[in-house]
Image (cartoon, rainbow, N blue to C red):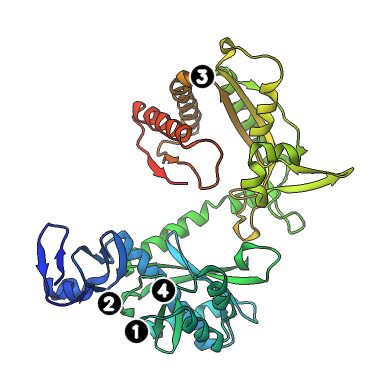
Amino acid sequence: MPVITLPDGSQRQYDHAVSVLDVALDIGPGLAKACIAGRVNGELVDASDLIESDAQLAIITAKDAEGLEILRHSCAHLLGHAIKQLWPDTKMAIGPVIDNGFYYDVDIDRTLTQEDLDLLEKRMHELADKDYDVIKKKVSWQEARDTFAARGEDYKVAILDENISRDDHPGLYHHEEYVDMCRGPHVPNMRFCHHFKLQKTSGAYWRGDSKNKMLQRIYGTAWSDKKQLNAYLQRLEEAAKRDHRKIGKQLDLYHMQEEAPGMVFWHNDGWTIFRELETFVRMKLKEYQYQEVKGPFMMDRVLWEKTGHWENYAEHMFTTSSENREYCIKPMNCPGHVQIFNQGLKSYRDLPLRMAEFGSCHRNEPSGALHGLMRVRGFTQDDAHIFCTEEQVRDEVNSCIKMVYDMYSTFGFEKIVVKLSTRPEKRIGSDDLWTRAEDDLAAALTENGIPFDYQPG
């Protein structure tokens, strides 16, 4: 007899297993109608999932951030449903949620046009207007594999073979005749998925590996009501007027071309602006007592192995070779600065030592992620490294924060969002060292009255 404890502390007792939707209906028909999913003991579950023992339960609706994310994920499945009806031979890859929307990578024997997107969106609306129930079935790994193999869904089969344990029971979501696979949760009925817009397509390699086949990625946005959707589309329209790629072309500042993906060809006026910005930053660095250095463009792979960068970052590094030695074109300035610091004897009296560089760096970013000047493969990284004692860390962080805000204020940047990144999964250094560093950074932000959010990893 499960006892269900709700967020307000009230409890409901049942003499049998109940679904999230059952509890919502017990509370009231309005909540049941709005119920998208539930959070049971901190874990998101489908509205149809059964609760068989005592549990903490929160009902998730479209007004909740989690509810909107679930709605968007279900719109990705709706896109899959539509595309398989229009072009049955399409093979579906992955369709995750992203900021403000979703995408689906598909293997289709045609280059999708805007007319195709309009046709797809129309079919999605026709399907959603049927308000059909989404049926979830937990099946064995073998049954899931057999299901997708019979449907010719090679990418789903590959996901099962390579990413899902044979002991697992994948969730299959049935949208009428269309079947997709996901951890979930998803909406229980398509009445929640009426306010969406397909936006664009791009190329994307399967699993992000350029050695694999290029798929087509279809992007869309989805919201809980028409007002939110229209407001978002209006914001996009306004932002497009200020798109730096459009301005760069209009003012003849730079260009990019296929023969050098992610690399910038600076024109005279653009390069003049670049150099003026560099001069301004250099002046501020001098004001805050930074030394300016210049490290080599590439270094022996052995050095990158010693620093741990090769182990954790190799896939993003460009390499070359000469005279039987392998070199890495630097993706960051850190190892070079350490080599400069290591030259000659240093005393604690020499600290803090602030070392800055306008480093020419290159990173092997996925082609699908490249975006004008905002996401490139070749860039100038004007960063710095501060060598100091542990006791000096707090003061140095405070000084760095002051310098950054000083620079931002010159350009009128006032609404600054600060995120404190914590230790990544791939890292060097002990956990104790990471904890001290994270605590010092958080304390410095707090002391300066700067609100921030943690960004794990």
Residue drawn 22% across and 63% down?
58
The image shows residue 56 at horizontal and vertical percentages of 20, 61
Which is nearer the N-term, disc 3 or disc 1?
1
323 displayed left or right of 114: right
Marks 2 and 4 sit apart, C-alpha to C-alpha, by: 18 Å
Give the distance between the C-alpha atoms of the residues marked 2 and 3, in whole angstroms.
56 Å
Q: Secondary structure at mark 1?
A: loop
**Compared to 426, does 411 lie above or below?**
above
- At horizontal 55% and vertical 52% (from top left) the residue drawn is 243
Q: Residue 75 got which mark?
A: 4
Residue furthest to the top in view is 349
As measured in the structure, the alpha-carbon distance from the residue carrying label 4 to the one carrying label 1 is 13 Å
Q: Nearer the viewer, residue 272 or 418?
A: 418
- As measured in the structure, the alpha-carbon distance from the residue carrying label 3 to the one carrying label 1 is 64 Å
Q: Identity of the amino acid at label 1? A: Asp
Q: How far across and how far down the image is residue 251, in percent?
A: 65, 47
Q: Which residue is mark 2?
A: 48
216 left or right of 231? right
Separation (CA) of disc 4 from disc 3: 52 Å
First-in-chain label (4 vs 1): 4
Q: Residue at label 1?
A: 129
Mark 3 vs mark 1: in front: 3
